[in-house]
């Protein structure tokens, strides 16, 4: 290598840090860090009105980095913290990132996000940050000042006392360029301040319990001195002092308008009412399931028709042969069958986003705390469970906010029982096909009610198992439950639409990659090996198709497990569906789509639902009756058919022991549950 | 009010003894340091005024207003460790 190149490389290595700044978002949970992150980076991250949703730190580039002549600024979204004494694993992540951030003029900076509605408490955190890292390391924004209530005099006064500039913003309505500009300007100014820094090491006092969430700090040796408090009083005393200091600083600030909080108080009188609180909670969730059915119904019918038509058109244009079969039976039958559930997924996430934004989730946590704690879980387990309705994986990660290890393990291990959106296609397919549509007790819809029941059953079983775990493997007292209640606010449709679109995209991506790949595999396995021509002689076309499937690899697998699933009311074709669904639940629907297209005699456009309804066995009896459908449904409620969940369980628990335990107990539940259901109903 | 206690000696009174709507002054933040720390973080200090907003039945969580615009909730069990003094009038 010639020396010029080496020199060039060295130069670029040296130049790299000066052209890049990293900014760490720090603030209370729910202060609006994620919203700000999305605004500045253009990223689309989950936004929610409940403490602890930002469970993993995320890095994003400023959108303005692409503009010419701008230096590169990266934003890091960290889990919310209340003070510098972490009380859970994710708060530990934040403290760890703070203490280890690079120092010096080119080092990282903190962007403290102060919540205007919780000005005093969040300023206490900011004062601690400034004391520890110095005013040249901390940028400040006051968020949620939607009505521009902080006056200029008040701001100037605050700036003087804190020793740093403050920008009042509303992450919802302030123009992105204003905040961007402020941060870039401050970055440049703060750099020059570095020279006058007091070289003495600052002391961070933390309790020994807090240290257990940041174990790396025991061996830390950097620009801060870690002091482990002799007892907890030392820590509370220090925070108390800071707090008093902040009260003095805030003497001249009037604070936010009282009206929104008075309104919140009135709403809470209803939603937290001793008698109506629980019915309202149940009503809201029933409404969500109801909407999924009634709103998505027509859209789904349409998309189903489209998929069926597409299959028909392609089926007629392509000459018969392998390619024809792969496209029509494997891909359109498999992937198409899953894709039709897009509207439901999008409606679910749209409504959940509205609910999250409104601030109701913390109230729901209060309402359910009695029940949760009866089963040995704290109110802190509510959010992970709630996320589990979308997908077990974010739910399991959200459980990092649970301070107590045993409680956390009990939550993680029962989370896969919560009905996630991957079960949705299976539920909708089977309920929509086999549960008759009628009105119950004048107001409820039978299908929505069935749906609600399955969700309820999953959650209820999760709690029962949690209780069992808390009485055996993970015995111990439940942790504290003290949460702050954000003000209610009108949810923004724009944010909900974005969220729902984003989830829809993720769903389609999964359908287009994993499900597509596996659908092709399913098709291959259900086509090969092919029986010899002589065997197929003297058979009708329908018999041929059926025989070919039986002869195939997948067919044989199904046949092998048939004796095991017979007591559940399932035949080998359903067995094939069950087998593949252990890769991902949606694959059940794909497999059914593929299998029933294969068996099709005429290439008439028929939706999967119609095919299932009319499927008869060799004796001409209907394969799917209500008992079989419910048996399958119950199987899906309980069993852990998701490789990604197993992987995350392994990651979070640090071994294969718990994933295997989780998988096994759920399989037993599923089998016993299906067996009982089938025998009770038939 | 027809009766009056001259000196407030009922220091054993805790948040759980308060009725919905009642106002009180915090005497301390409890002896359990994790509860203490959490309440401090939410912005409470001894001497602050609180009022009870809602109580979930069967000894469920209690929601409380603190200051003019702050709200939080805690369990019955945690509330029972925090001593208060009723504000008259
Ligand atoms: N009114 C108002 N609400 C905001 C503002 N910024 C964020 N929010 C809302 O506050 C809630 C919490 O925001 P989020 O970004 O998830 O907070 P994080 O926990 O700090 O990441 C969400 O419901 C947001 O819609 C703001 O400037 N004004």
Image: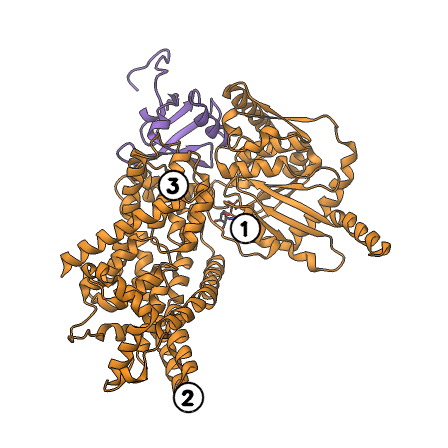
Chain colours: A orange, B purple
Mark 3 residue element: helix
Q: What element does badge 2 sit on? A: loop
Mark with earlier residue (3, 2) = 2
Mark 1 Cα-neighbour bin, 10 Å: few <14, some 14–19, many ≥20: many
Q: Are marks 1 and 3 on the same chain?
A: yes
Tell me if residue A486 can be seen: no
Whether label 1 lies within 8 Å of ligand 1 gets the answer yes
What's the mark number on residue A381? 3
User: Are discs 1 and 3 less than 8 Å apart at CB?
Assistant: no
**Residue carrying label 2:** A319
| Ligand 1 is within 8 Å of the C-beta of the residue at disc 2 | no
Nearest to viewer (mark 3 / mark 2)? 2
Marks counted in the figure total: 3
Q: Which chain is indicated by disc 3?
A: A
Where residue A338 appears, x then y in whole percent? 38, 68
Q: Nearer the viewer, residue A557 or A514?
A: A557
Q: Are marks 2 and 1 on the same chain?
A: yes
Dot 2 crowding, Cα within 10 Å, few <14, some 14–19, many 20+: few
Nearer the observer, disc 2 or disc 1? 2
Confirm or reject: label 3 Cβ below 8 Å from ligand 1: no
Q: Look at the picture and state if B7 lies above or below A439.
A: above
Which of the 4 image quarters holds residue A303? Answer: bottom left
Q: Which mark is residue A35?
A: 1
């Amino acid at each position: 290598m010639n020396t010029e190149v080496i020199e060039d490389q060295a130069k670029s290595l040296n130049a790299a840090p000066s052209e890049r700044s990293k900014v760490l978002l720090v603030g209370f949970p729910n202060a609006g860090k994620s919203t700000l992150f999305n605004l500045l980076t253009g990223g689309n991250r989950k936004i929610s009105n409940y403490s602890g949703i930002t469970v993993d730190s995320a890095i994003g580039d400023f959108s303005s980095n692409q503009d010419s002549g701008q230096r590169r600024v990266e934003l890091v979204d960290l889990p919310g913290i209340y003070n510098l004494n972490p009380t859970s694993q994710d708060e530990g992540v934040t403290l760890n990132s703070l203490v280890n951030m690079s120092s010096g003029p080119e080092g990282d900076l903190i962007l403290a996000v102060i919540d205007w509605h919780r000005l005093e408490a969040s300023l206490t955190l900011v004062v601690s940050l400034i004391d520890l890292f110095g005013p040249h390391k901390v940028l400040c924004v006051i968020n949620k000042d939607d009505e521009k209530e902080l006056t200029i005099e008040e701001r100037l006064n605050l700036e003087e006392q804190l020793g740093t500039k403050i920008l009042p913003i509303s992450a919802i309505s302030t123009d992105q360029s204003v905040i961007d500009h402020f941060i870039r300007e401050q970055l440049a100014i703060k750099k020059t301040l570095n020279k006058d820094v007091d070289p003495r090491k600052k002391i961070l006092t933390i309790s020994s319990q807090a240290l257990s969430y940041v174990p790396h700090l025991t061996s830390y040796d950097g620009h801060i001195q870690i002091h482990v408090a002799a007892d907890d009083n030392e820590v509370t005393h220090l925070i108390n002092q800071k707090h008093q200091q902040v009260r003095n600083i805030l003497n001249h600030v009037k604070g936010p308008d009282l009206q929104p909080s008075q309104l919140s108080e009135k709403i809470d009188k209803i939603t937290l009412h001793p008698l109506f609180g629980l019915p309202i909670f149940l009503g809201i969730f029933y409404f969500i399931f109801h909407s999924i059915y009634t709103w998505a119904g027509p859209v789904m019918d349409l998309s189903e028709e489209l998929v069926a038509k597409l299959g028909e058109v392609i089926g007629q244009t392509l000459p018969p042969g392998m390619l024809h079969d792969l496209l029509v039976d494997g891909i359109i039958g498999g992937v198409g069958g899953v894709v039709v559930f897009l509207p439901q997924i999008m409606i679910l996430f749209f409504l959940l986003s509205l609910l999250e934004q409104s601030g109701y989730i913390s109230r729901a946590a209060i309402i359910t705390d009695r029940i949760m704690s009866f089963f040995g879980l704290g109110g802190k387990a509510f959010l992970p469970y709630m996320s589990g309705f979308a997908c077990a994986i974010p739910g399991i990660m959200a459980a990092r906010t649970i301070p107590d290890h045993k409680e956390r393990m009990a939550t993680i291990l029962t989370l896969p029982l919560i009905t996630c959106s991957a079960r949705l296609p299976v539920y909708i397919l089977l309920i929509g096909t086999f549960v008759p549509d009628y009105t119950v007790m004048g107001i409820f819809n039978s299908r929505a009610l069935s749906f609600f029941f399955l969700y309820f059953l999953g959650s209820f079983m999760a709690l029962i198992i949690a209780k069992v775990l808390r009485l055996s493997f993970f015995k111990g007292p439940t942790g504290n439950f003290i949460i702050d209640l954000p003000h209610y606010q009108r949810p923004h449709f724009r944010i909900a639409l974005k969220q729902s679109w984003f989830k829809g995209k993720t769903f389609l991506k999964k359908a287009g990659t994993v499900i597509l790949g596996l659908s092709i595999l399913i098709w291959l396995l259900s086509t090969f090996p092919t029986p010899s021509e002589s065997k197929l002689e003297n058979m009708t076309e329908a018999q041929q198709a059926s025989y070919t499937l039986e002869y195939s690899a997948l067919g044989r697998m199904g046949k092998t497990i048939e004796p095991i699933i017979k007591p559940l009311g399932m035949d080998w074709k359903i067995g094939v569906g069950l087998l593949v669904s252990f890769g991902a639940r949606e694959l059940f629907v794909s497999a059914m789509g593929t299998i029933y297209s294969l068996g099709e005699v005429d290439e008439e456009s028929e939706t999967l639902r119609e095919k299932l309804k009319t499927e008869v066995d060799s004796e001409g009896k209907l394969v799917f009756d209500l008992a079989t459908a419910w048996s399958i449904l119950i199987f899906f409620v309980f069993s852990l058919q998701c490789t990604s969940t197993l992987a995350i369980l392994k990651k979070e628990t640090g071994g294969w022991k718990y994933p295997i335990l989780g998988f096994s107990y759920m399989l037993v539940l599923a089998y016993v549950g299906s067996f009982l259901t089938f025998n009770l109903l038939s | 009010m027809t009766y009056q206690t001259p000196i407030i000696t009922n220091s054993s009174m805790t948040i759980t003894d308060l009725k919905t709507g009642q106002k009180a002054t915090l005497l301390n933040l409890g002896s359990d340091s994790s509860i203490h720390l959490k309440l401090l973080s939410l912005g409470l200090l001894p001497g602050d005024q609180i009022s009870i907003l809602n109580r979930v039945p069967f000894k469920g969580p209690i929601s409380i207003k603190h200051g003019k615009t702050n709200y939080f909730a805690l369990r019955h069990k945690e509330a029972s460790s925090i001593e208060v003094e009723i504000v008259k009038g």
